[in-house]
Image (tube, helix red, strand yellow):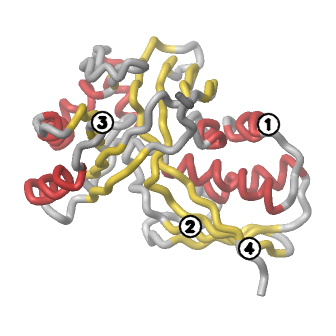
Amino acid sequence: MSQTWTHSAPAKINLNLRILGKRPDGFHELETLMVPITLADELRFQKKERGIAMTCSDPTLPCDATNLVWKAAALFFQTYAVEGGIEIHLEKKTPHGAGLGGGSSDAATVLLALREIYQVDVSDEGLAALASQMGSDIPFFIYQRAAWCRGRGEIIEPIDLPFSYQGILVHPGFAVPTPWAYQTYAQNPSRGESGADLGWVTLQNDLEPAVFLKYAWIPTVKRWFQEQPEVLDSMMSGSGSAVFALIKLGENREGVFNRFRAEFGVDIFSVLFEFIGETKKS
């Protein structure tokens, strides 16, 4: 029986997302603090003689060259002239179209896994540069730790977290298209609401005003979380549609979780999470 390699592909949340203006290349200039969390997809790999094969637990996702997972594998083999192939199974747990970077994380995880499986001598920085050819969020996931991301999101500055937080993440079951969110913001640029000051970052997302105008569920849930005494603050992640709540240290997040399900229904995607990444030693 051939060896199987298993890797987790963590989701991310944006604790701060500022849009600094429009770039000459048409993208927006960003400054955002992203943190990987314990919600994660799982990818399983087996070597094959040649070519790429892919399966997925989510029947709505394509398992061909249009999928970022496949694209990442093809780019890796082409770039490093690796002789061989790979079979990939994606166990999908992170909602897509949610502002959680699920597809980007899957792609980065493929690059990390293939580096290990085929023993290719390339640094994290080298893989991140390769990842940037596929999308702005993908380089962040190469490092699998909190980081400030600038430019289009491809300039990565990993950081140690002063504190680790726990929280609740919810997803309404619909997607917010990222291009639409940025285009709508550009029509009427306005700052997102300034939220809790954690001492090392202030919660803020400049895409919230644009998204909230069309998708009323998102601000409704955010306000509900903010009204719960255990909650430090709540915010939309990325371009949406997921919303997260940070729970005060020492507080009972299960109580908030159960009240949310009672209020909004058990069919809404909801999960407890913690931050992933290095924390500063006291």
Q: Residue at x 24, y 49 (%)?
A: 253
Which secondary structure lies at badge 2?
A: strand
Q: Position of residue 197 (x, y in %)?
A: 31, 19
Mark sitting on residue 126: 1
Which secondary structure lies at badge 3?
A: strand
Compare marks 4 and 3 and give the one earlier in the sequence. Answer: 4
Instruction: Give the camera-side residue of 20 and 254.
Output: 254
Few, some or many residues within 10 Å of mark 2 (<14, 14–19, 20+): many
Q: Can you say whether 113 is above or below 195 in the image?
A: below
Compare marks 4 and 2 and give the one earlier in the sequence. Answer: 4
Compare marks 3 and 1 and give the one earlier in the sequence. Answer: 1
Which secondary structure lies at badge 1?
A: helix
> Is 80 on the left or on the right of 272, as rendered?
right
Q: Residue at x 55, y 25 (%)?
A: 149
Q: Is residue 113 visible?
A: yes
> Is 164 on the left or on the right of 196, as rendered?
right
Compare marks 1 and 2 and give the one earlier in the sequence. Answer: 2
Few, some or many residues within 10 Å of mark 1 (<14, 14–19, 20+): few
Residue on which the image places disc 2: 90
Mark sitting on residue 46: 4
Compare marks 3 and 2 and give the one earlier in the sequence. Answer: 2
Name the amino acid, label 3.
Answer: Met
Residue on which the image places disc 3: 236
Mark sitting on residue 59: none
Quadrant including the N terminus: bottom right
Q: Hey, which quadrant is residue 130 in on the image?
A: top right
Spatial distance from mark 4 to mark 3, Cα to Cα? Answer: 37 Å
> Is 253 on the left or on the right of 258, as rendered?
right
Name the amino acid, label 1.
Answer: Gly
